[in-house]
Structure formats: C-alpha cells, structure tokens
Amino acid sequence: MGSLRLLLGLAAALAVASFGVINMDPVAIAYYKGVLRLPLFYVLLAAFAAGFLLAWLGGLFDRIRFRHEARALRRQARTLETDLARAREQSGRLLAASNPPAGEPQAPSSAPPPPAGQPARPVQEEGKDGPPA
C-alpha cells in the first residue's frame, strides 16, 4: 500500500511539474492598488495552497473537538471501571458474609417463621443422620 501511494504521489508531482513548465506565461492580476504580473503556474499554485490551508484549518478545529471528546470518554470509562471494581468487591464481601466457610456453624436464618398451625421443620445437617428429608 505504501509503494502504491509513493507511485501515485510521484505521478501527481510529475503532472504538476509538467503543467508548470508549459504554463509559465505571465498573467495580469488586478487588485485595488495596481496590477501584478506573475506566471500562471504560480497563481494557480498559490490558489491551491490557500484552499489547502483553509481546509486544513477547518479540519484542525474538528480534530481538536474530537480529541477533547475522546479524552472525556476515556475519563468516563476509567470512572465506570473503578465503580465496577468497587461494586464487584462489595458483592464479593456480601457473598462471603452470606456463605460462611465449611465447618463453621451457620448464623440463625432470617427466614420468616412457618405459618400458624404448621410445625417448624428441623434443619438437619448432611452427613450426621443421613440425607436431609
């Protein structure tokens, strides 16, 4: 791809150079204070350069705006990543608190009591008296 761009650039430079050699006849440029006589190639080259400069300046403002927007989005992404890490850490602590390690007695359940008239089912630990009923 790079060599193709180089070849196209060389072809364009050759075309511009040959155009400049052919069009070196002076032209008169009239302005408020007088007349300026320059070769046609120089006048066209100055016009193209001025157009290029104006387009580049217009694009510069867009690039500045896009960089500012990208910086703000990166800052927002970092904030969201830290919030996510904090939420994961908190959920891990909550899970660890609700699931005690094996061998430790369980804290009393905060489950609601059974309805009136029904006996509470005893909690059996697996392995002591067989599987839970």
Image (tube, grey):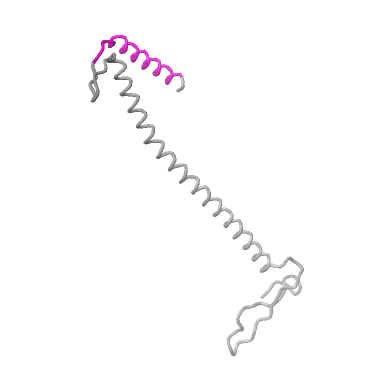
In the image, taking residue 132 as reference, residue 79 lies left or right, namely left
The secondary structure making up most of the magenta span is: helix
User: Which residue is depicted at the point 34% across and 15% down?
Assistant: 16
In the image, taking residue 102 as reference, residue 21 lies left or right, namely left
94 lies above or below 27: below
133 lies above or below 77: below
In the image, taking residue 8 as reference, residue 32 lies left or right, namely left
Give the number of marks. 0
Q: Position of residue 111 (x, y in %)?
A: 62, 78
Q: Quadrant of the N terminus?
A: top left
Report the front residue among 22 and 66: 22
Report the front residue among 78 and 67: 67
Q: Quadrant of residue 92?
A: bottom right
User: Which residue is depicted at the point 29% across and 10% down?
Assistant: 24
Q: Please give the range of residues in magenta.
A: 3-27
Report the front residue among 41 and 27: 27
3 lies above or below 107: above
